[in-house]
């Protein structure tokens, strides 16, 4: 485990695991040679495949495509929008109304996409809990 507040992700040992110096990253030492995996979706997919978790990462191509689509939606939307909103609202050296309003509107739109989707199905990618749910829930 690597606490984010220590900035240890910028050390050379960590950069060997994730050249982008971001958390999360892992080094699977049960493989030979050890396998590095970075970015949350890549880690989820790696672990699901390693442990044959077809309940979370379906073997059926159509079902897997739906899980993968929502997983990529999360990777491309949530951190950028939530992070952008938080940055311009709280951390920017001065308030930029346009940026705050833009990120607020887009964040609300993305949440509406999820609300509409979940009104018609039990889980993000269908009727079964999947990697998409694991990735999207914290956001």
Image (cartoon, helix red, strand yellow):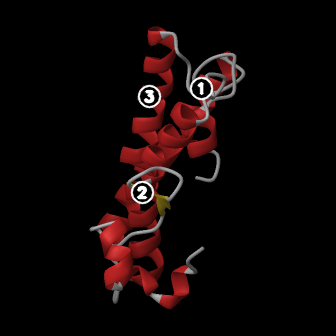
- Distance between the alpha carbons at the discs numbered 2 and 3: 26 Å
Q: Identify which residue, 61 or 76, lies in the foreground.
A: 61
- The secondary structure type at the circle numbered 3 is helix
Q: Residues within 10 Å of mark 3 (few under 14, many from 20)?
A: many
- Distance between the alpha carbons at the discs numbered 2 and 1: 42 Å
Q: Earlier in the sequence, mark 2 or mark 3?
A: 2
- Distance between the alpha carbons at the discs numbered 1 and 3: 19 Å
Tag 1 residue: 116
- The secondary structure type at the circle numbered 1 is helix
- The secondary structure type at the circle numbered 2 is loop
Q: Residue furthest left?
A: 19
Q: Residue furthest front?
A: 32
Q: Identify which residue, 108 or 38, lies in the foreground.
A: 38
Q: Position of residue 70 (x, y in %)?
A: 47, 31
Tag 2–tag 1 contact (CB < 8 Å) = no
Q: Residue at x 34, y 66 (%)?
A: 18
Q: Residue at x 69, y 16 (%)?
A: 127
Q: Identify which residue, 57 or 117, lies in the foreground.
A: 57
Q: Residue at x 46, y 51 (%)?
A: 78
Q: Identify which residue, 49 or 81, lies in the foreground.
A: 49
Tag 3 residue: 68
Tag 1–tag 3 contact (CB < 8 Å) = no
Q: Is residue 19 above or below residue 108?
A: below
Between label 1 and label 3, give the one nearer the viewer: 3
Q: Is residue 130 above or below residue 36?
A: above
Res 8 → quadrant: bottom left
Q: Position of residue 136 (x, y in %)?
A: 57, 43
Q: Position of residue 113 (x, y in %)?
A: 51, 32
Mark sitting on residue 34: 2
């Amino acid at each position: 485990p690597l606490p984010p507040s220590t900035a240890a992700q910028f050390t050379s040992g960590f950069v060997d695991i994730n050249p982008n110096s971001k958390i999360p990253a892992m080094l699977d030492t049960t493989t030979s040679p050890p396998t590095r995996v970075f970015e949350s979706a890549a880690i989820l997919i790696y672990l699901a495949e390693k442990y044959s978790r077809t309940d979370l990462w379906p073997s059926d191509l159509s079902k897997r495509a739906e899980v993968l689509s929502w997983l990529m939606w999360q990777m491309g939307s949530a951190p950028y929008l939530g992070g952008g909103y938080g940055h311009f609202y709280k951390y920017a050296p001065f308030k930029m109304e346009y940026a705050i309003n833009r990120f607020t509107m887009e964040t609300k739109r993305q949440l509406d996409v999820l609300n509409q989707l979940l009104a018609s199905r039990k889980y993000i990618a269908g009727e079964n809990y999947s990697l998409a749910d694991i990735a999207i829930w914290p956001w």
